[in-house]
Amino acid sequence: MSDESTAGRTSRRSWRLRAAAVSFAVLALTAAACSSSDDTTSTPTGGNSNAAAAAADPSLPKLKVGFINQEAGSAGTYPENKAAASAAVNYINKELGGIDKHEIELDACATDGTVATSQKCSQQMVDDKVMFVTGGLDNNMQAWYSVLDPAKIPVIGGVPVAGADFNAANASFFVGGGATTYPGLAQYIIQFMPDVKKVGILANDTPGAASALPLVEKPLRAKGIEVTDVKVPSSQTDWLAPFASEGQRRSRGARRLRQLHQLGQGPGDAAERCADGVGQRLLLTGDH
């Protein structure tokens, strides 16, 4: 077999890998964004005949894409990510002709917020010989790399959570995750809430939250703002108690609490009701 023939096949596989990654990521993000819109739909012009003409060829080998997402456990579940990914694959295969007429096959695996299941799903990707792995959100994504890297399986897309995600040699992301969003929270307080002197932070007790906290705390402390944080166990689903405790601890002589923002797991509307009269502006952070 000639080197030219081998190089040609390698080039085509590389093109398919890039095309599958970009098409899948863009359409999955679009599907996720549209999932909260109204239910009105329109019928494509031309009916089923046009859709069939554009469909991928099922007789060709499928392009297997791995998908790891957290869908069980108390640390947070994100089933909407799986729904968006499945919708994206279905649209690519049926309406866009697949990738070079090849269908994409989604090899999905759900984690439960533990390192063990993240490693188990990573091993499934290796055993199934996927082209690359993408993800919705997994709090223990850093556990993927030790399994995927030796098999030379790249991670493309998903949400970077902890430091290992940002430094992984074989991973590329389309969003910045906490590294880009958390400093913005601190800047918002500094720029638009100049009278704030003290900030309390509730954070999940997870690697992702530990990586994110300094991104909020350092800019605030540099401006002379006192910052304290309370780490909430990832298994705790009710945040009302730590929310109230942190607010009451600072309520002496302080003004009415104002909830600035909430990320990740949190008490939602119940926290806003709890906030009335507690006495301080409180920043809630999560792990993503």
Image (cartoon, helix red, strand yellow):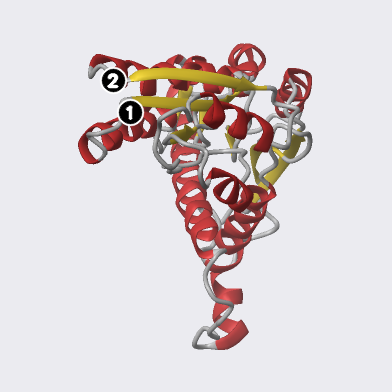
Above or below, 184 against 267 in this view is above
Please identify the quarter of the rendering in which residue 36 is found. Answer: bottom right
- The disc placed on residue 119 is none
> Residue 152: horizontal and vertical position, in percent?
57, 18
Give the tally of numbered discs: 2
Q: Is residue 207 visible?
A: yes
Q: Position of residue 240 (x, y in %)?
A: 66, 38
Image quadrant where one finds the N terminus? top right
Label 2 to label 1, Cα distance in Å? Answer: 8 Å
The disc labelled 2 sits on which kind of residue?
Pro
User: Which amino acid is tagged 1?
Assistant: Pro
Residue 202, position as x, y percentages in the image: 54, 27
Please state the horizontal and vertical placement of residue 88, each as a whole percent of the image.
Answer: 57, 57
Is 59 displayed left or right of 38 in the figure? right
Up-down relation of residue 193 to residue 249 (above or below) = below
- The answer to whether residue 185 is above or below residue 231 is below
Q: Nearer the viewer, residue 239 or 55?
A: 239
Snapshot quadrant of residue 173:
top left
Label 2 vs label 1, nearer the camera: 2
Which residue is found at the position 63% from the left and 11% from the top?
146
| Tag 2 near tag 1, CB within 8 Å | yes
Identify residue for label 2: 219
Label 2 secondary element: helix
Task: Name the residue at 49% across, 87% down.
Answer: 45
Residue 204 drawn above or below residue 31: above
Q: Nearer the viewer, residue 11 or 22?
A: 22
Disc 1 element: helix
Q: Earlier in the sequence, mark 2 or mark 1?
A: 1
Residue picked out by circle 1: 183
